[in-house]
Amino acid sequence: MVEKQIIARGIKDECVINAMLKVPRHLFIPEQYRHYAYSDSPVPIGYGQTISQPYIVALMTEELNVSSTDRVLEVGTGSGYQAAILAGLASEVYTIEIIEPLAKEAEARLKKLGYKNVKVKVGDGYLGWKEYSPFDRIIVTCAPTEIPEPLIEQLKDGGIMVIPVGSRGFQYLYRVKKVMGKIETEKITPVSFVPLTGPHAK
Ligand code: SAM
């Protein structure tokens, strides 16, 4: 998977490649879909949700440019796979999932696999996690129609957010930088994520 889908497509960051090599993706996927664990596509994880395609996980992680002292917020825990990748690169990972059973399953899975620097919360990620803010990095793995204001507020000055933004089924992935209190956005590539849901979804 890492050679054919990730390195061959241009992911170069050694730390990201090593993190992807270390995390056993099949353990984040329900048994009935495990034979698809290393295939080049998203895979169902229940509750109408998916674990993202490996290449997209690698691309978002590379764009996030995480360093070992960073505190990272993830919106959309899902299976916990992206959080596990980030846990190997960052100092602390805070991840929010709106579907309670998914959050609980991911939390138990991450604990069982020995990840000690990940905190999981059930809640609406649109609102971020104020208690632990500001964050050096924010990654959003579901798609809002615009960048949530609370996430901009909770991003540290000099920080980076990677987020898909757009309509249902079609979005662009953006790299957002906060520079002296102002936001600079850069379009990366077209993507298709599940929508950000909850009371603030438009
Ligand atoms: N990062 C996940 C992984 O590694 O398995 C994949 C995430 S999946 C593509 C998107 C997730 O975002 C879903 O589990 C969905 O329930 C969650 N989600 C949608 N809206 C949300 C919200 N407002 N707050 C938190 N999570 C949300």
Image (cartoon, rainbow, N blue to C red):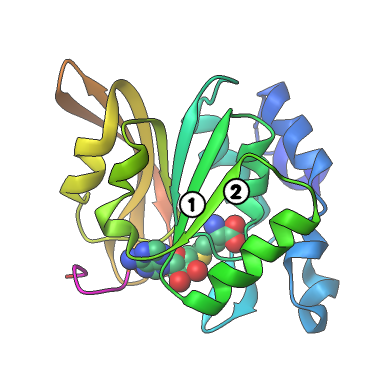
Number of the label disc, if any, that sits on residue 57: none
Q: Which residue is mark 2?
A: 83
Q: Which residue is mark 1?
A: 95
Residue 16 percent coordinates (x, y): 67, 31
| Magenta-highlighted residues | 197-201
Residue 52 visible in this rendered orientation of the protein: no
Q: In the rendered image, which quarter is residue 130 located in?
A: top left
The answer to whether any part of residue 164 appears in the image is yes
Depth order, front residue of 47/34: 47
User: For the residue carrying disc 2, how many other residues have a C-alpha within 10 Å: few (<14), some (14-19), or many (20+)?
Assistant: many
List x then y, in percent, for residue 157: 26, 20
Q: Is residue 101 left or right of residue 18?
A: left
Q: Residue at x 61, y 39 (%)?
A: 86
Q: Residue at x 22, y 49 (%)?
A: 147
Asked if the residue at label 1 sits under 8 Å from ligand 1, the reply is yes
In the figure, is residue 87 to the left or right of 49?
right
| As drawn, 178 above or below 126 | above
